[in-house]
Image (cartoon, grey):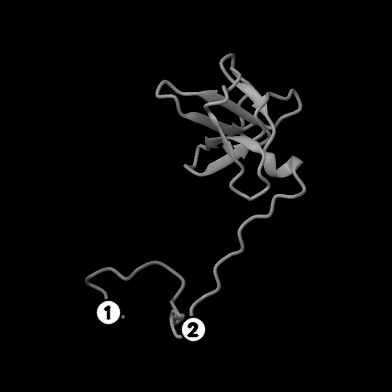
Amino acid sequence: MVPSSHDLEPCPYGCGEEVLVTITEHGRRLPVNPGPDPAGNQAVWCAGTGTWRSRALNGRDAMRLLGYEDPFVPHVATSPTCTPRPRQTPLPGLTIPSARRRIGRLPRPYRRT
């Protein structure tokens, strides 16, 4: 299924191109190029609610392309001007102390440590 112009939105990475934003199996947003590509590694389909979903085709346990899915290419792989957002630097003074933990099973309630 080919997405319509109403399904497209500007690239969230700032290149300005129109992309189709899908939701992956893990609930993350993945922008893909607007047209199907036979060399694509993402299976994309439109769910019954109008949400565009995607899953990977190149994983070890990945299923083959199903009849209602089309192969698409992730937009970041084809656009050299896309820059992912930098990770936020940790705030000073809010470090979490690292606690040394014993490796092994937890003690049972009737055992003394």
| Residue on which disc 1 sits | 112
What SS does tag 2 mark?
Answer: loop
Which residue is at 44% across, 79% downward? 96
Q: Amino acid at mark 2?
A: Pro
Q: Quadrant of the C terminus?
A: bottom left
Please give the name of the residue rendered at 48% of the width and 78% of the height, measured from the top-left corner. 91
Q: Is residue 91 above or below residue 68?
A: below
Which of these two is toward me, 30 or 97? Answer: 30
Label annotation for residue 101: none
Q: Residue at x 43, y 77 (%)?
A: 101
Quarter-of-image position of residue 56: top right
Name, please, the residue furthest toward the bottom: 93
Mark 2: give few (<14), some (14-19) or many (20+) Cα within 10 Å: few
Q: Is the residue marked by circle 1 packed among few (<14), some (14-19), or many (20+) residues within 10 Å?
A: few
Q: Is residue 26 left or right of residue 43?
A: left
In the image, is residue 98 above or below residue 105? below
Q: Which residue is mark 2?
A: 92
